[in-house]
Image (cartoon, rainbow, N blue to C red):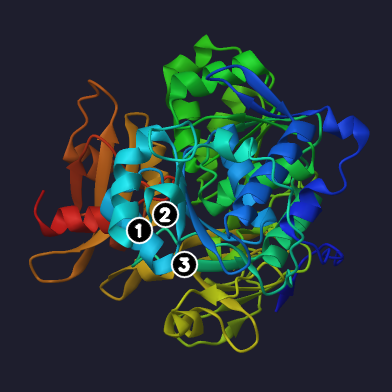
Amino acid sequence: MFHSPFDPIDIPDLSVYDYLFASLTDDELERVALIDPASGTETTYGALRDQVDAVAGALAARGVGVGSVVGLLSPNIPAFATVFHGALRAGATVTTINALYTADEVAKQLRDAGATWLFTVSPLLPSGGAAAAAVGIDDEHLVVLDGAPGHPSLRDLLTAGEPAPEVTFDPATHVAALPYSSGTTGVPKGVMLTHRNLVANVAQSRVIIELGHDDRVLAVLPFFHIYGMTVLLNMALKQRASLVTMPRFDLVEFLSNIQTYGCTFIFIAPPIAVALAKHPIVDQYDISSVHSIFSGAAPLDAETGAAAARRLHARMLQGYGMSELSPVSHATPVDRTDVPISSVGVPLPNIDCKLVDTETGEEIAEFGADGFTARGELWVKGPNVMLGYLGRPDATAETLDADGFLHTGDVAVVHRDGYYAIVDRAKELIKYHGYQIAPAELEALLLSHPKIMDAAVIGVLDDEHEEIPKAFVVAAPDSGLTEDDVKAFVAEHVAPHKKVRRVEFIDQIPKSTSGKILRKDLRARESVGA
């Protein structure tokens, strides 16, 4: 077993609301919590707390409390913070929904979660309204934050004049958030995260991720995803930083917002790192205010990370987590200059880890001559581990063992100096003639090619029904790159069994909103011969 290098910390026995807002000082009340680039509106911490209390009171007066589940279908706007924390303040459980979902997908999540309310915005009302109708949520329980005829609005809740309720529950067992796992390898499942889970992960993360009250955080990663919810929204609020909200990623707007608002700390997923490293438009903006870039949600290769860091003259940090871990379990400490960019860092305080051989089930503990352990599935234990999957005791039992370790499904190695690297998903390893091939390794190599803008690799069957690596490649415009060029480049750098056997050029690599490659979409494309 491997332990965190940090001393254990005390996890406050508090609700999320009390942890984030109860200790605000008079000076902090005047600090800016949220900035909306669309309008230029700034919301102070005092105003935000008042809004959260007002929403909590209005919802409680309408019967929302412990046992209620509300859906939140919204992009990153300041109102997201108000509604999310207002609902938690009222004792409800919030299931956050991907803003890109279709009506059928929204309905499926609402139904599975048992939601009786839905909060959305007018641009998403077509999908949200159809989904609400499909699951029996009437117009009075479908709140359109920016207003729509026949529906309550956020303004209605804020001006209702109802006092915030007195709510009692056990933070260790009461489910605060119910995000759904991304479904990159299977059917999305509701991840039950308690108040203690969310409080613990902010408390753990702030030990390593040095985000301060003078920082301005560009919040482009979606709040509805657990990475955005915990690391951007909740941790930034706890640190009394300022959040600059972005409803969607657009590179020009991203760079413009950094320049306009002097953003200092940006949290990204690897696709954004690729853009920062390779896109020529980056040089047209003054983004010198950025001192730190933190990448998560999927593995970031060293070359891309280093190129992005050099371009921005900023430090590149990487972390690891998953929805089931609230989500962070590992991060790179700022003062650990010995930790390579390709590493996801070290375990947060209060976390223990195991590496387990995927073939034998034996625990891995020995370090090799190169300083690393053999590869093994990463198991994680700590106060941030979920309660389980909603209504899925079978899936919960497969993922959480009797000792409290969560089996991540990710393959990792550990260096004797205590830092970790994620080398692939256990379920995504390609087995070619008995050899195991990690798609992430080939993807990192492909991204190092100057004419390749993005890439993904999956295993496909050849004519003899043997699994082989296939690369999906986004080539630079007018590059003239050919399939043979790609194959030859890979073959020059890897062992023969790792060679890419097929190449398909596509316009865009399908990815989740959190930046994970949607390999299931690539497999579906392959199965229909697209």
Mark 2 or mark 1, earlier in chain: 2
Q: CA distance from mark 1 to mark 3?
A: 41 Å
Q: Label 3 neighbourhood size at 10 Å, few (<14), some (14-19), many (20+)?
A: many
Residue lying at the far right in this picture: please name it.
26
Name the residue that disc number 1 marks.
495
- CB of mark 2 within 8 Å of CB of mark 1? no
Give residue 111's position: percent from left, percent from top. Answer: 37, 65
Quadrant position of residue 427: bottom left
Q: Nearer the viewer, mark 1 or mark 3?
A: 3
Vertical comparison of 131 with 295: above or below = below
Amino acid at the residue labelled 2: Ala
Identify the mark nearer the N-term, 3 or 2: 3
Mark nearer the viewer, 3 or 2:
3
Residue at (84, 33) in percent of width and height = 29
Q: Residues within 10 Å of mark 2 (few under 14, many from 20)?
A: many
Evaluate if marks 1 and 3 touch, with contact meaning CB atoms under 8 Å apart: no
State the mark number for residue 440. Answer: 2
Instruction: Name the quarter where the N terminus is drawn.
Output: bottom right
